[in-house]
Amino acid sequence: MSDMDVRARLAAGDLDALADAYDRHGPYVYGVAVKVTGSQAQAEEITQRVFVALWEEPLSYDPALGSLRGWLAGRALHESALRARVG
């Protein structure tokens, strides 16, 4: 399934599309967050926040600008940096 298909399915409210995206990209997003924060607990929270954001605002991801994996990793990096600055 293409990133465009995932976005369309998410926009239509297809919860299975979120599960598919998580299965495919969740471990990578978590790994990015662990690497930046050094905390498994924070990485779990960040991963959850990233996928909730994808579910709540699927149109904020634009496949014309890059891959879904890249978008998710960018969100994870941003969240991780915010936590690192606060912590």
Image: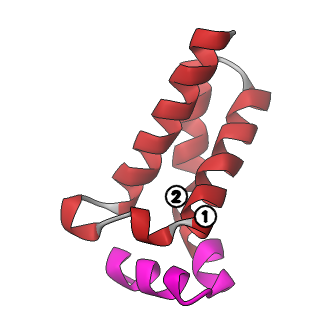
Check the picture and name the quadrant holding the N terminus: bottom left
Which quarter shows the C terminus? top right
Secondary structure beneath dot 1 equals helix
Q: Is residue 81 above or below residue 62?
A: above
Percent of width and height locating residue 66: 24, 58
Crowdedness of circle 1 by 10 Å Cα count: few (<14), some, many (20+)? some
- The percent coordinates of residue 53 (x first, y second) are 59, 57
Which residue is painted at 52% across and 21% down in the image? 81
Of residue 65 and residue 34, the one placed in the foreground of this image is 65
Q: Identity of the amino acid at label 2?
A: His
Residue range of the region highlighted in magenta in the rendering: 1-19
Q: Which residue is mark 1?
A: 22
* Residue at x 60%, y 14% (from the top left corner): 84
- Which secondary structure lies at badge 2? helix
Residue 60 image point, x, y percent: 41, 62
Which quadrant of the structure image shows residue 15?
bottom right
Asked if residue 12 is among those painted magenta in the image, a careful observer would answer yes
- Give the labeled residue for mark 2: 25
* Crowding near the residue tagged with mark 2, few <14, some 14–19, many ≥20 C-alpha atoms within 10 Å: some
